[in-house]
Image: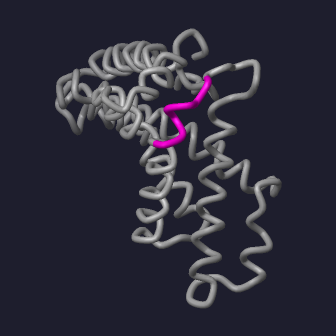
Amino acid sequence: MPVVSDTTHGSLLLRVRDPRDEEGWRTFYDIYAPLITRYAQARGLRPADAEEVLQECMTALARGMRDFDYSPEKGRFKSWLRSMVNHQVINFLRRRRDRQAGEEQLAVLPDTDPSVSAVWDRTWRVQRLTYCLEQVRAEVAPKTYEAFCRYVLDEWPVTRVAEELGVSANDVYLAKSRITKRLKDKMFELLGSDT
């Protein structure tokens, strides 16, 4: 599988500084909304609560991106976003303290907790790969995508994949090769030379 970079392509960050750039914001939302939701759920929020945190985060991002100065030497967008999302999760839990979180749960939520970083980093990588894989899925034949998923993601033996899909073993290897290359290309499109 391709390596997933920890950086965000600067051109996308520049695009979303313009609130009228609907395509830029749609791409930004498609990438980061699932990341924020998954992270909030990984921190213990129910799906509906994670959606509320997502809306609060997107509102804050829409306001904050206008003045966001993309300067990699000052720090990564990933770190800034993690801090902002974690802050929103903590605020949500504080508002719902009586109903959802006791003091002991709030105590483990500080941004400096190493487990918070680990959860964020894993969620970051998974979401970027998921986003790019969905983009590739729309570009290839369904059987090719299915062969790739069963062989690469599900780790089925090539003979089983070939038999189940009614294709040759060579077709399975070609599906892996083609989709892996296209996935790398998509990652490059998303992240630039930092892939």
At x 63% / y 32%, what residue is drawn?
77
Where is the C terminus found, in terms of image quarters? top right
Taking the image as drawn, is residue 86 in sight?
yes
Percent of width and height locating residue 176: 38, 21
Q: In this view, does 11 lie above or below 16?
A: above
At x 51% / y 51%, what residue is drawn?
36
At x 67% / y 39%, what residue is drawn?
80
Taking the image as drawn, is residue 133 in sight?
no
Q: In this view, does 45 lie above or below 19?
A: below
Q: In this view, does 63 lie above or below 89?
A: above
Majority secondary structure of magenta residues: helix
Task: Place residue 44 in its image quadrant.
Answer: bottom right
Relative side of 153 to 108, left or right: left
Q: Give the range drawn in magenta.
A: 63-69
Residue 24, magenta (yes or no): no
Task: Place residue 92 in its image quadrant.
Answer: bottom right
Relative side of 7 to 158, left or right: right
Percent of width and height locating residue 89: 60, 63
Residue nearest the observer in this picture, 168 or 175: 175
Residue nearest the observer in this picture, 139 or 128: 128
Residue 68, magenta (yes or no): yes
Task: Place residue 159 in its image quadrant.
Answer: top left
The extreme top residue here reads 193
Percent of width and height locating residue 73: 75, 18
Percent of width and height locating residue 97: 63, 83
